[in-house]
Amino acid sequence: GVTVDRVVDNPVEVSVSPVVLDRWDKLRGDWTQEYFRDPFFLRYWVVGDNLKEPAVWIDGKVVIDGRVFVPMAKVEDVISVFHDAIRGGHWGVRRTCALIARSCIVPQLKQRVTWHVTNCLICQRCNNSN
């Protein structure tokens, strides 16, 4: 099986806004099991028993060039946290994608965010689907 290697004990601190920190606080936890069930992750970021560079493990998440790679099982959670927030949420497709892309790598991000925004009752009511 694949091992968890290239762990960073002291990750570089990044300056982020309180709104983004609040959002990430809701996504706490170790995602290791979700990564190893994600065929895209396994195909593109694992070689043998190792992560491909520049990917590293930080606090149970895979970080690539300063952004968290989001496994398929966590994509909807991430989109919900960034889009549905009371403070600074419901921005529509373009802005939600931009906000997520600053700190995450999500395969098919625009397609997934478009689906989420299209099905968001608040966005439908406000017609905020830019």
Image: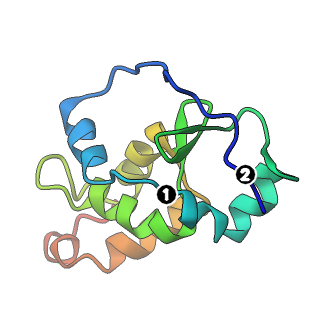
Q: What residue lies at 88% left-to-right and 53% top-to-bottom?
A: 48
Numbered mark located on residue 108 in the image? none
Query: Which residue is depicted at the point 21% across and 53% down?
Result: 89
Nearest the viewer among 10 and 88 is: 10
Vertical arrangement, residue 1 with respect to residue 91, above or below = below
What kind of element bears circle 2? loop
Residue shown at 61% from the left, 61% from the top:
35
What amino acid type should be assigned to the residue bearing mark 2? Answer: Thr
User: How many neighbours does mark 2 have within 10 angstroms: few (below 14), some (14-19), or many (20 or more)?
Assistant: few
**Spot occupied by residue 62 in the image (x, y as percentages of width and height):** 58, 45
Spot occupied by residue 64 in the image (x, y as percentages of width and height): 63, 37
| Residue that carries the numbered disc 2 in the rendered image | 3
Q: Residue at x 38, y 44 (%)?
A: 99
Quadrant location, the C terminus = bottom left
Asked if residue 115 is positioned above or below residue 106 in the image, the reply reads below
User: Which percent across, then down, holds residue 87?
Assistant: 12, 48
- Left or right position of 72 against 46: left
Depth check: 61 or 7 in front?
A: 7
User: Does dot 1 land on a helix, a strand or a loop?
Assistant: loop
Name the mark nearer the viewer: 2 or 1: 2
Evaluate whether residue 34 shows in this view: yes
Q: Are marks 2 and 1 in contact (CB under 8 Å)?
A: no
Q: Residue 17's quadrant in the figure? A: top left
Towards the viewer: 122 or 17: 17
Disc 1 residue type (three-letter): Trp
Q: Is residue 71 visible?
A: no
Q: Locate residue 17 relative to residue 111 in the image: left or right.
A: left
- Indicate whether 35 appears above or below 104: below
Q: Would residue 72 appear left or right of 123 to someone viewing this image?
A: right
Q: Give the labeled residue for mark 1.
A: 31
